[in-house]
Amino acid sequence: MFTLAHLSDPHLGPIPAPAWRALLNKRFTGYLNWQRKRRFIHNMDVLDALVADLAARKPAHISCTGDLLNIGLASECPLAHAFLARLGAPDDVSLVPGNHDAYVAESVRLFTRQFAPYMTSDAGRFEGFPFVRLRGPIALIGLSSGVPTLPFSARGTLGREQRQRLEQILRFLGSQNLARVIMIHHPPHEGGAGFGRGLTDAVGFESALEREGAELVIHGHNHVTSVAHLKGPRGLIPVVGVPSASAAGGTPSHRAGYHLFDFDMTEQGISVSARQIAFGEQGVNESPLDLDTRYSG
Ligand SMILES: [Fe+2]
């Protein structure tokens, strides 16, 4: 069995006090939002406990779907480096950026430069997105939906080029007897996020999957567990959202958690089942997560 752990949206804090010049853009509203609200939700003690629990289970690989930073500042990067190093070596941890990692244009360049080792393809170089990493029975395909947007917008976009490359990759990997696992920050299906928060080219993503298929899509961004399905050529593809890895406040469904996906080789091919590990007020709770893949095959 091969176990893949998925966590997302740690929103690492506290944000080091920024120079006023760094706030003369969208970061101004983002910083106020952190000071007034987010710093009370994202609790680093909760994150510590979650990472310790995850490490003790020794998954074969870890996927993190972004929003490590909050307002895309260079001074936030040391926290992200320390967090990733705790998860594991770059070969064992795969990362894609979220909208908070691509907060303004310079954040995109910064994030890519700083964290490239976690986003390289198997050729060992960072070659942009999608990247592909083969690990045991799975092929991890990392997408970047993080693009700078206007204040109060948390939208994401893949763009035509990335969608076309994704389709070619899915087609090639489809004949390799591997489970194709797509990592993306935004929920990639239509209606997957609230107004101003979704993927602008969800329709294009859906068509690519409908033509070429995938075995699993994992995402963050909404800070709750969710299971949706997209149409593939051979049945429904599970699309699974994970809570924030550091959330302490909010409703019980918004409390911190992570997911474990177990891949098994069977005579019919590769099967996948999932578990959710939730960090509520009563402590850590593990329960099965129904992917409802009975229509695929
Ligand atoms: Fe996000």
Image (cartoon, rainbow, N blue to C red):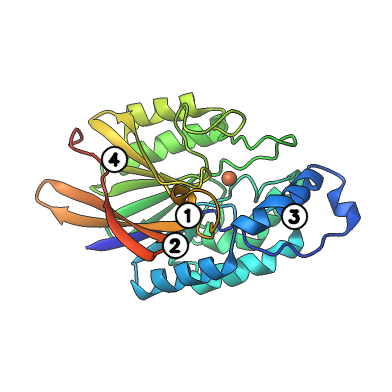
Q: Residues within 10 Å of mark 4 (few under 14, many from 20)?
A: some
Determine whether 113 is above or below 208 in the image.
below
Q: Amino acid at mark 1?
A: Arg
Q: Amino acid at mark 2?
A: Glu
Residue 249 in percent (x, y) is at 55, 55
Determine whether 44 is above or below 211 in the image.
below
First-in-chain label (2 vs 1): 1
Can you tell which mark lies on residue 35?
3
| Residue 69 visible, this angle | no
Q: Amino acid at mark 4?
A: Gly
| Dot 4: element | loop
Q: Is mark 2 within 8 Å of ligand 1?
A: no
Q: Residues within 10 Å of mark 3 (few under 14, many from 20)?
A: few
Q: In the image as oriented, which residue stretches furthest toward the left?
A: 267
Disc 2, disc 1: CB below 8 Å? yes
Q: CA distance from mark 2 to mark 3?
A: 24 Å
Q: Residue at x 62, y 30 (%)?
A: 196
Q: Residue at x 47, y 24 (%)?
A: 203
Q: Amino acid at mark 3?
A: Gln
Badge 2 is on which residue? Answer: 281
| Residue 261 visible, this angle | yes
Q: Residues within 10 Å of mark 1 (few under 14, many from 20)?
A: many
Q: CA distance from mark 2 to mark 4?
A: 42 Å
Badge 1 is on which residue? Answer: 255
Residue 14 in percent (x, y) is at 70, 64
First-in-chain label (2 vs 4): 4
| Dot 1: element | loop
22, 93: nearer the viewer:
22
Q: Residue at x 75, y 57 (%)?
A: 73
Badge 4 is on which residue? Answer: 174
Determine whether 55 is above or below 254 in the image.
below
